[in-house]
Amino acid sequence: MDSNAPDIRTIAEDEYPGWVRALRAGFLNSSELTAEELAARRGGIELDRTQGAFEDGRCVATFRTLPQRLTVPGGAAVDSLAVTNVSALPTHRRRGLLTRMMRNALADGRERGDVCSTLDSAEYPIYGRYGYGPATWSTDWTVDAARAGLDPRWSRPEEEGARIDLVEPAQARVLGAELHERVRALPDRQGMTDRTERWWKLSTGAIDWPGSGFPPSFTAVYRDAAGRVQGLLTYTADDNWENEAPRLNARVRDLIAADAAAERALWHFLLSMDWVATVHCRRRAPDSLLPRLLPNPRAARITSHADFLWLRPLDVPALLRTRTYPVSGTLVLELEDPMGIAGGRFLLDASPEGATCAPTTRSADLSMGVGALSSMYLGDESASRLRELGQLTEERPGAAALADALLRTGRRPWSPDVF
């Protein structure tokens, strides 16, 4: 390593303000850094999981991890090393700083017992070289309320006795946290991650600073006939008038639903609202019930569709043992890991009753990089398609089809949260 290369280490308390300044500069945020922002950010940062690259006493690159629970197919959750706040000053890019910090973090995560690592990738080409692969995709929608075909006189959910209530932020923190944990444990919500108490305080304004990303909003909850909260909708609205008529843009910030009835009711509630002309919604599941839940699905159009949550294994046997499988089958996977952490040959013996996975010397059925396994693990990507793309080699005829039968899920994985 170049003796003049920046020193990479976990940061000390007195280095924290300089670290935040470097983070903001790396993301081209030139607004004033206030004491309020420094104090608010500090509560969510563990210094022993926060790396900085230092040159002449100045922080020039940043990297941080946090503990996370990731839901996998079947509803179980695994410990994940979540990577965030990765930046470098424009003067210090492409010097190998990310590689050095990533290597440190992945080694620490493996030693800590994390089963995988996750991140939200801002730029597609970067993270494949570290063994990550896109594991979930996300869709943004814009809906023309007038064309949706909903009765503007709509006032109540379809289920008799169910209702929708607006709640205050303090209520939203409690009701939302309970609902989210319940929904996240459902067997078909793979890709969802836990939300901490701090997340809920940020989202409801109990912790705030200019530019925090959580503007003041409305929260509505859907209660079923038994009074149990089964859905939550958080939204804002722009004050937009045309020709002296209100044509407001409503923006969905969060929509959690435990079942289809709750999801339909919350969408109908928002799209039937007086003054709302257009609804914008970001980061929905790629197979969301929208737009088919509308009388006129053509009122909704996709404005963005892209990869979102990226994943890489740290402990392959533990990762493959934890999820469920719809059919029985045995596969030997040969995995190559560019970081030298999770590579090897593994025997997966799976059935609807459970699975075992361990290193093996048997001949491989499929060969691939760990990033390809990452893309298949939550149930979204097809081994057959990866074979056609040249990202997977079928060593035994029929092995790709068996992998599809074992790994793919009825609903596509979804991860709504930036971390």
Image (cartoon, rainbow, N blue to C red):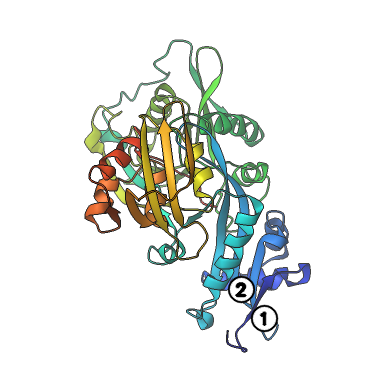
Residue indicated by mark 1: 58
Question: Please, is residue 2 above or below residue 97 in the view?
Answer: below
Question: Please, is residue 186 above or below residue 369 in the view?
Answer: above
Q: Outermost residue toward the right?
A: 14
Residue occupying image coordinates x 56% and y 15%: 227
Look at the image and tell me in which quarter the N terminus lies: bottom right
Q: Where is residue 199 in the image (x, y as percent from the top left)?
A: 62, 45
Q: Position of residue 236 (x, y in %)?
A: 48, 43
Secondary element under disc 2, as helix, strand or loop, is helix
Asked if the residue under mark 1 is in contact with the one under mark 2, i.e. CB atoms within 8 Å, the reply is yes
Q: Position of residue 40 (x, y in %)?
A: 70, 56
Residue 291, quarter of the rendered image: top left
Image disc number at residue 250: none
Secondary element under disc 1, as helix, strand or loop, is strand
Which badge, 2 or 1, is on the more N-terminal residue? 2
Callout 2, which amino acid? Ala
Residue occupying image coordinates x 25% and y 49%: 385
Residue 289 visible at all: yes
Residue occupying image coordinates x 64% and y 43%: 196
Callout 1, which amino acid? Arg
Residue occupying image coordinates x 37% and y 38%: 330
